[in-house]
Amino acid sequence: MTFELPGCSPECPFGASRAGPLSFEVGQIHRVATIPPAGTDDVDETRRNVLKLAGVGAIILAGGGLAAASIQYVQPPAVGLTSYPKVQLIDVNGKPLTVTGVEAEYNVTTAPLVLFNYPLRNEPNFLLNLAPANGAAPSLSNPGMWNAPGGVGTHGSIVAFSAICQHLGCPAPAISYYPPGTCPKTFATPNSPAQPYYIHCSCHGSTYDPANSASNLTGPAVLPLPQVTLVTDDAGNIYATSLTGPPVNGHLNSLQGDYGVGTTSQLAKENPIYLCPQ
Ligand code: FES
């Protein structure tokens, strides 16, 4: 495989990250956009509930001077889940996501990020199909992965990982999936002596191996990305059922900190940020 992208050094994306640090608000989670039903607004429930409570607090202040009580009520409520929900994934068109659909549309060369929130709102995860684009078995000259740890689908190639970096919490698209050929850099991994695809965080350079449970390839992060446990039913529908690995960055417990996504979670696409020129 040759790389002739102008300005893309053999050490890209690392040389690029050292030359010009990415300006990105660390820890600010981008909400994964979904398409609201026609005629409805996409409402941020957390903000709406806080505004409601602020309104209640203002009434109490005006009526009786119960300042201490009102301050207690304007605090956002502690929210979260007590256990991992089984959440059906919905495709970008609002239909149930199936193995057949994923394998037809996505493969190891897919560049746009495919994201879904789980288990909480505003907690994006990558959905990746690591199977080679040509349908043939992976090899050094045909990059990709079958039977990936935790993988589902015909060849166990469909996997999902938190899209929030384990270093300081940069979310997608600052942390992005790099398909084969995006940058010259390759890694020796348990599955390949020169793996040309990886997940890389532009904020400070952490790299993860999507073919090996998102283990660390480079720091400064020292922990892998949490992996979403995916399951399928007899019809090939795909569900998220839990997270394994460390907690999502910024959480002591991946279940606490926001409201749950509900019973379904819709995929959204986002353009990646690559440090190497395209
Ligand atoms: S937030 Fe620092 S490497 Fe990702």
Image (cartoon, helix red, strand yellow):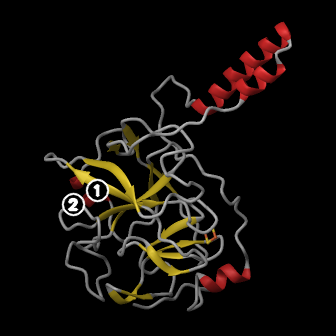
In the rendered image, which quarter contains the C terminus? Answer: bottom right
Q: What's the CA distance linking mark 1 and mark 2?
A: 9 Å
- In the rendered view, tell whether residue 162 sits above or below residue 209: above
Outermost left residue: 234
Residue 250: percent from the left, percent from the top? 60, 56
* Residue 44 seen in the current view: no
As helix, strand or loop, the secondary structure at mark 2 comes to loop
Residue at 50% x, 22% y: name it.
39
Q: Amino acid at mark 2?
A: Gly
Residue at image coords 28%, 41%: 96
Instruction: Name the residue rendered at 61%, 78% in the picture.
Output: 220
25 lies above or below 92: below
Query: Looking at the picture, how far across and down is residue 61, in whole percent?
Result: 83, 15
- Above or below — where is 222 with respect to 186? above
Residue 200 in percent (x, y) is at 53, 73
Residue 191 found in image quarter: bottom left
| Residue position marked by numbered label 1 in the rendering | 102
Q: x%, y% of residue 216?
A: 48, 77
Ligand 1: quadrant of the figure: bottom right
Mark 2 neighbour class, 10 Å CA radius: few under 14, some 14 to 19, many 20 or more:
many
What residue do we see at 17% from left, 63% from top? 154
Would you name the residue on which mark 2 appears? 153
Tell me: is circle 1 under 8 Å from ligand 1.
Answer: no
